[in-house]
Amino acid sequence: MFRRNLKPAQFLSLIMVAVLLSAGFLLSGCEKKGPDVFKIGSVLSLTGSASVWGENTKEGMELALEEIHASGGIKGKKIEIIYEDSQSEPKTAVAALRKVISTEKVPVVIGDIASSNVLAMAPVAESEKVVLISPGASNPDISHAGEYIFRNFPSDALEGKVDADYAYQQLNWKQVAILYIKNAYGEGVYRVFKETFEKLGGTVVLEDSFDQGAIDFRGQLTKVKNTNVDGIFLPGYPDEMAKLLKQAQELGITKPFLSTQAFDDPQVLKIAGDAVEGVVFSTPEPPSDAEPVVANFRKNYKKKFGKDVGLMSDTGYDALKIIALAIERGGYSAEAIKTQLESLKDYPGAAGSTTFDQYGDVPRPVMFKVVKNGQFTNIGYRVDAR
């Protein structure tokens, strides 16, 4: 009845309006459904001097991805991880971060594991309002890098302090030399160690640095050999520390060494051999195998990759699982993910319980190990930072 009173032109106009309205409703419905795949960016040191940890982290993430998909994904949808290699260099890390944000429009990026890279990336993530979660960076300055910056790995603020306490109180060192890698990680630990050690009453007799990627340390070691110290504090990366210790042995240096969590890698033993015997180092205390999630992670990791869990494998695994949980609970946006991370309490992960503090950090207990008969051996001394 209504159509009969319309002229042909008017009828065609109504048809066009109806088509446009239908298209609008359909588009609106598609927008509400969200993406078919949840894309997550990842910038990791897959080559370069920090690649051992980048690969460990990636393997942990790949295991987590496999398990998430096996259990139905996020509300039935899959995750796609877009990996970019930072090459263990800050400039490359920044370029990689910009690329994955601009081309893939991701709301969250996992990485990097090198502190210098994360400190360089943080201003970009902050300005773009993209969540950046690091499974390995430890420099204290990251705590104040921005409200979109998180990490589920302990800060050097704790590590440097407990190392200095251990050196002064347990090893009875009163005079030390410090040799540290010249990057954000090494400088962060060195700064906190020196400040704490001197407050306790100790003296830093000599301090010197070496470049990331260096292969000759004889100049620094000769200075140490000619100095009267009780011991040498050595924060660095596995490759450089192993070569440095081998050269120290060749130069006849017998002073004891104290190192950091970065020492906790089989690569050190492989490169340096018996030159690392007796070296003491601090490392995040692993959670108990009595926890089902921990036991399953270690079992499944070894089954998938044919080796034991390496440093940052568990934090990489947890990082992806936590992000997936945040998307499931809050939605696929940086603001929603950020809100969920801020409210996360006692998440039972492979690396232990995770709760982000006001700075986006996760304090964890620290333990000490020693190289004994070519093996990393627990000393039985720990500090609970929680």
Image: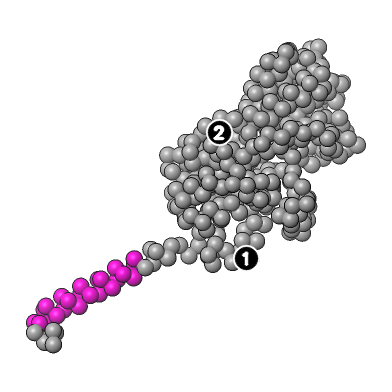
Tag on residue 143? Answer: 2
Q: CA distance from mark 2 to mark 1?
A: 34 Å
- Snapshot quadrant of residue 284: top right
Residue 29 versus residue 239 in the image, above or below = below
Of residue 305 and residue 51, the one placed in the foreground of this image is 305
Residue 233 location (% of width, % of height): 75, 23
The answer to whether residue 99 is seen in the rendering is no
- In this picture, residue 61 sits left or right of residue 243: left
Tag on residue 71? Answer: 1
Q: Which residues are magenta?
A: 6-28
Of residue 106 and residue 209, the one placed in the foreground of this image is 106
Mark 2 or mark 1, earlier in chain: 1
Q: Quadrant of the N terminus?
A: bottom left
Amino acid type of the residue that numbered disc 1 sits on in the rendered structure: Ser
Mark 1 crowdedness (10 Å alpha carbons): few <14, some 14-19, many ≥20: few
Indicate the secondary structure of the residue bearing disc 2.
Answer: helix
Q: Verify whether residue 18 appears in magenta.
A: yes
Residue 20 versus residue 189 in the image, above or below = below
- In this picture, residue 7 sits left or right of residue 154: left
Residue 267 location (% of width, % of height): 78, 40
Amino acid type of the residue that numbered disc 2 sits on in the rendered structure: Ser
